[in-house]
Image: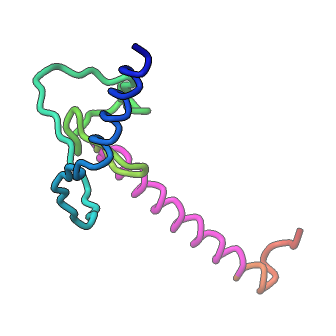
Amino acid sequence: MKSRILLTSMFSALVFVTLPAISANVVVQKLTFERAKQQVQAVGNTEAIHSVMLYPAVGDRVTAVHFKPGDKVKKGQTLLELDSRRQKAALDEAKIKLADTQRILERLQQSQAKGGCAKK
């Protein structure tokens, strides 16, 4: 019985070794690298993590808004314009007072140069 098993094993090994190897067709191609583009289309609602309420520092009327809700804004960008008529009137008044004070200073300096007023 042992010889029969040994003989069968030897015959199987001989058949396995002498048979031609079965080859598979292999396709070879050079690798190319491309950027993968991933895009997701979805419908939904989003909510900002951070939001800001804008209030003017002075109690004046807003005359122009330079952004829409959801717009990205940059540092230094003008967001709101206020009614500036009162500030312009105050500036004009300050300019008039400055001119008047400069005129008084000039008159006093001329008077001092002529000895009309005492030096401090």
In this view, the residue farthest toward the right is 120
Residue 36: percent from left, percent from top: 23, 50
Q: How many numbered callouts?
A: 0
Q: Residue at x 70, y 82 (%)?
A: 110
Q: Is residue 105 magenta?
A: yes
| Vertical placement of residue 103 versus 16, above or below | below
Which image quadrant: the N terminus? Answer: top left
In which quadrant of the rendered view does residue 57 lie? top left
Q: Nearer the viewer, residue 96 or 91?
A: 91
Residue 61: percent from left, percent from top: 26, 33
42 sits left or right of 4 in the view:
left
Q: Nearer the viewer, residue 33 or 36?
A: 33
Residue interval drawn in magenta: 82-109
Q: Nearer the viewer, residue 101 or 26?
A: 26
Q: Residue at x 24, y 51 (%)?
A: 21
Which image quadrant: the C terminus? Answer: bottom right
In which quadrant of the rendered view does residue 73 lie? top left
Q: Is residue 88 magenta?
A: yes
Colour setting? rainbow
| Vertical placement of residue 31 versus 86, above or below | below
Q: Residue at x 70, y 73 (%)?
A: 108
Q: Main secondary structure of the magenta part?
A: helix
| Vertical placement of residue 110 versus 10, above or below | below
In which quadrant of the rendered view does residue 109 lie? bottom right
96 sits left or right of 13 in the view:
right
Residue 89: percent from left, percent from top: 35, 50
Q: Nearer the viewer, residue 67 or 110?
A: 67
| Vertical placement of residue 6 versus 83, above or below | above
In this view, the residue farthest toward the top is 1
